[in-house]
Amino acid sequence: MTTRLLINGRARDVDVEPHRTLLEVLRDTLGIFDAKEGCNEGVCGACTVLLDGRPVSSCLVLAVATRGKPITTVRGLERDGDLHPLQDAFLRHGAVQCGFCTPGMLLTAYAFVEAHPHPDRAAIREALEGNLCRCTGYTKIVDAVEDYARNRCG
Amino acid sequence: MRMIEGGHGFAGDPRAVGGVGGHIGAPHSVVGQRVVRHDARDKVQAATAYAGDWAMPGMLHGVVVRSPYPSARIRGIDTTKAAAMRGVACVLTARDVPRNTLMTDVPGQTTTVGPLRAKLHVLAEDRVRHQGEPVALVAAETLEQARDAADAVEVDYEPRPGVFDAEQALAPDAPKVHDEGNLLAHWRIARGDVDAAFAGAAVVVEGEYRTQFVDSAYLEPETGVAWIDSDGVITIRLSTQVIEHFRDVADVLDVPQNRVRVIGAYLGGGFGGKEDVTVEVYLGLLAVKTGRPVKMVWTRQESLLARAKRHPYRLRYRTAAAKTGEILAQDVELLGDSGAYAYLSALVLLYSTVTACGPYRVPAARVQARVAYTNNPPTSAMRGFGAMQTVFGYESQMDRVARALGLPPADVRKANALRRGDTLPVGQVIETHCALPELIDRAWAGLGAPTPPRAPHAKVGRGLACNLQPYGRIVWLHDWASAWVGFEMDGSLVVRCGCPDVGGGQASSLCQIAAEVLGVPIDRISVHIADSALTPLAGTTTASRQLYMSGNATLKASGELREQILGVAAKLLETSVADVDLAGGEVRAADGRTMPLRQVLAACARMGVPRSHLAVYHAPAGEPVDLTKGSGKIFPDYTFGCHAVELEVDTETGRVRLLKHVAAHDVGRAINPMSVEGQIEGGAVQGLGYAMMEEVVLEDGINLTTSFASYLIPTTVDVPDVEAIVLESGEGLGPFGARGIGEPPIGPPAAAVANAIEDATGARVTRLPMTPERVARALRLLT
Amino acid sequence: MQPFEYAAPASVDEALALLARHGADAKVLAGGQSLVPLLNYRLARPRFVVDVNDLPLDEIRVDAGRVRLGALVRHSTLAASAVVARECPLLTEAAALIGNVRVRSLGTVGGSLAHADPAAELPLAMVALDARFELRSARGSRTVEVRDFFSGYLTTVLRPDELLTSVDAPPTRGAGTAVEEFSRRPGDFALVAVAAIVTIDRQGRVENARVAIGGIDGVPRRIPAVENALRGEPPATDRIARAAELARAEVTPQSDALASGEYRTLLAGVLTKRALARAVSRAMAVPA
């Protein structure tokens, strides 16, 4: 059925079979590879996107069920082609290694700091608990989010 | 100290670079800087095209049909129903494979070593030996159709008795996994008079330890796309640590090796699990059979079910020490589980054998190591590669020796630490600086003030553990790597190197090295990696070898290119080569004159002087020998490290909460300190996963942990911040004195945690992972 | 995933009509955090999926002296609700322990309860709270007490044509409540979880205690032996500990890949003690 998806502020009318997950439609139908498939059961967080501003596992959402709701992928964080300050913090702190978890990690962290502007390290760790990273050991990711949150509020 | 071929190396002042032709380029402007990696910029924007982020017109989807049984005879396979299903392009079984044998001994190498030879069938013929063993392949228009057809392949299995434990596999009446018997490999080291040393010891400590199956658990499962290119070359773009598997694909397909091209995408993690062949042979078969592009993405379940694991070990140690804490002898017996196929088991076991006594002087040692076939999932390479399991053994023993003698564990380790000139039990002389005492002091001090327990039932303890990890491949393999560095006419630079980038910053480091030598801003460099047809081959991204090997090749190529360019520049400026330099993207003369690089490059073109250079770096080489007679050099060199942890034990439940982790390594030289810290922090946390929670649970060969909900890897809240301490002795064999640091940090955490648990509670845990339940047992909370 | 027909009705009646028509061939899709993994792995192959997310069932309100949660209240909403924190803080604590942030974004109260995982937080909390469930179908509606709702591992008394529309529980003002959960890794399903609700009388003795345990049997359940041992007693540490020990005798858990039954039994005792201790200290802090 034709379904209107709102991806990074752009409406896309897509012919979607009801049994397709949002992750499948993004990757296989639309060629948007921003979300990664790591487990297909909502555990790893690599497929995280924001739905209505909240992090969700795009592998556990039917695409048809997202009709009309704003979806943000990692590219939706950028402003006029410039990196979002959170992306920049990930770069400066060396928070990226293989990068497979990075889009999901960025979106989860972004949504968290929007809702909790003054987090401490423990709160950041709690917030990112559902996004697995196998490379970094998390220290530099927490550094980056902490730095971003601090600078964001001046 | 040895000089790297090509004249790069260090003497005296470790900051001084001995450049080609004696040019001194210090201080470094790019090497040693916290450079933001080019690939990181792509990755935060999701611009990196991983293997799965690839689609082609008319692409089919491939699926592997796998055995549900750990041990069975195949009486027959009926594919007619599956082949007739809608959308199915082909169904393949062993009969359809031109050469159904795959060599799996030392991936990517051009030198073979008899005792390491190993092979398996691409698709099972008359027997399956582990759950998940590939039996057939399906390609169809959609993934669903391929999966439906895979379900419809009818395999007539006759289940057979299996053996699921290495000890039982070596019993005389055990079912044979392979006709030649279940003992796959056996290594022995004998040095000094072990029995006399034990007889004269003040203390003898005995311990038995067990480690578990674990999975690489990279976030990106095994993935690739294959197509027949317009020139007929079979092209496979995938997530692999070894593009040289193009040779294996060609052998299986029975085509010349130059008709297969492997392109290595930036990986979503490797950790050794993508060292062996994964999807490429299957993709090659399906693409050739159908003539169409084919994609294959293993599910997480499939990856956890069927991919090779880390070897579980039983380690038995007897350690003899003098009253002073001096280690007099080690008597070590190792037994590993190879699972159903050999893969790299013999080599992994060799790493264990060589490292079994740790980074210590051990005058008398007897090491007996065996690895056996079972009907468990195969085991092979994983970060640490056999030098990891042994750390849990020897570092648990070191703490017990210290405890038995009433000496501080740190002091006992420092007193026995290897020094330059000491000889390992295997007969290899340590030729570089071993900074173990300093690493121990810095790691221990890094723990800072003690943390008070949070509750009456909580106890806090501290522990440390050291390790040595080889970097670079065993010298028997005659390892080499090549790299090409060339200027474009505008002064921008291209680096080509066959090195796959697993996420550790391999490609970026090559850019830094070239930038340093050639004075080119790093953002003016493009690096092309991991294409078996278009980049000079550089070997595997394994064995902590790429910075060492490809780094040296890039350094050599850059140095030679620099000489070529400066020779021309000196002529143009009518001065001597010694008085010109490359910096800031221009030529600078000692007298202050400058010349734009493009002017020099134009002159090079006119004069027929190449603007590029291809260099090959050869690692130290040696021939296989009988280890029992002492072998001399086995590995090029070693990286040393020490980790210290502080933790809190809940004495009512056995739950361990990790509080602090300090990880110190002598990396020789940090080309990019940010990347080095990243390797240390990430390796330490993988090591903590091994210590605390990771375990592939098998019940008679059936895997009970085939999801990320049951195979547990650490999350942000399971681990503390890791403080990485980076020591730079300048003593490594890599570029600018660097040592390998990819694998070393994964080794020490498990032993450090076990030692800290004993420090907190007096209870010793000898089995991994140290789950709350196992700790509760050690605390005698359970019967 | 296997293909299926899909509808997203806008009204409860429309949804019930669809369920009446498709019955056992249909699956109700709420937050999808349990259903979609089953679909992804083809462990569930419904012919019809009724997406109930558009139904007006996401209200939290206090109604006739009970806290009523619409079936579509998301875990994140539950965790953040001021009304719930005031009236039923056990649910606030339980909701915060559920899964990870993505599960809490989409997962619903009704979905979790209908899925009936014995190690999940909300079923346990509802057992401790003596909740009631409203079940509706095209044939009418019925109210089911929590003790009758869960019928076994991943099963409830919900009929194929029925929809769980709301759940309500008495407020616990004046009581102290606590949830203790033990999982191998935070965010994962619990090996064992215990919920406790304690009220203290004017003499400082335990007036009433309710203790529920999950992760042990096919359904979460109360442990009357522990509750009875505390009633009328002063809530001293040693008495709590002794009462909690009774929990160990009341359970016979199974072993699995994550933990042995013996270890779960140990945890049952420890977690009961800790949940009671925290509930008591909170009850003591309640102004008389």
Image: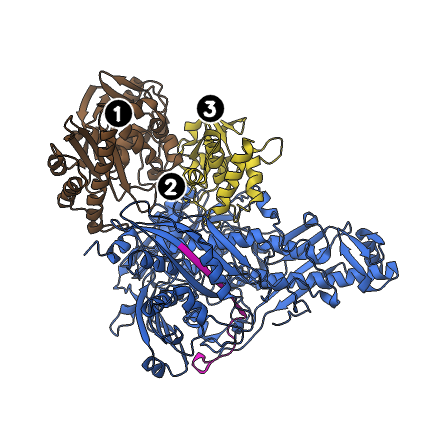
Residue B388 on image: x %, y %: 42, 63
The amino acid marked with disc number 2 is Glu
- Indicate the quadrant where residue B373 lies: bottom left
* Identity of the residue drawn at 88% across and 61% down: B574
User: On screen, B373 above or below A14?
Assistant: below
Q: Which chain is blue?
A: B
Residue C163, label in figure? 1
The amino acid marked with disc number 3 is Gly
Q: Which chain is brown?
A: C
Q: Secondary structure at mark 1?
A: strand
Residues shaded magenta: B626-645
The shade of chain A is: yellow
Q: Which residue is mark 3?
A: A68
The amino acid marked with disc number 1 is Leu
Label 1 to label 3: alpha-carbon separation: 25 Å
Q: Chain of mark 3?
A: A
